[in-house]
Image (cartoon, grey):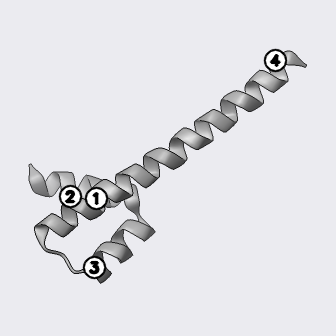
Amino acid sequence: MATEELAETRGASMNRLVLFATIASGIIAAYLMYKRGESIGTIAKNTITNPIGSLVTEVKNKV
């Protein structure tokens, strides 16, 4: 029983970590797009549909 509870707690913590990482990457990507001069509509569309991919694209544009 204790190992099942530990596994559930670990799973919930991992899900929460993935959620916060996704939100953070979307915010960072939106900021980078804003600094580059993208329109608000484009920023919203890209970061809502694919926040991690948007961040990767913006980092590639910076380098």
Element under disc 4: helix
Q: Earlier in the sequence, mark 4 or mark 1?
A: 4
* Classed neighbour count for the residue bearing mark 1: other residues with Cα under 10 Å, few (<14), some (14–19), many (≥20): many
Q: Position of residue 14 (x, y in %)?
A: 59, 35
Q: Which residue is mark 2?
A: 58
Q: Position of residue 25 (x, y in %)?
A: 36, 52
Q: Amino acid under label 4?
A: Thr
Q: Earlier in the sequence, mark 2 or mark 3?
A: 3
Residue at mark 1 to residue at mark 3: CA–CA distance: 12 Å
Element under disc 1: helix
Tell me if 48 is positioned left or right of 57 in this view. Answer: right
Q: Residue 40 has which mark?
A: 3
* Classed neighbour count for the residue bearing mark 3: other residues with Cα under 10 Å, few (<14), some (14–19), many (≥20): few
Q: Is residue 12 above or below residue 7?
A: below
Q: Position of residue 41 (x, y in %)?
A: 31, 82
Q: Earlier in the sequence, mark 1 or mark 3?
A: 1
Q: Residue at x 44, y 54 (%)?
A: 23
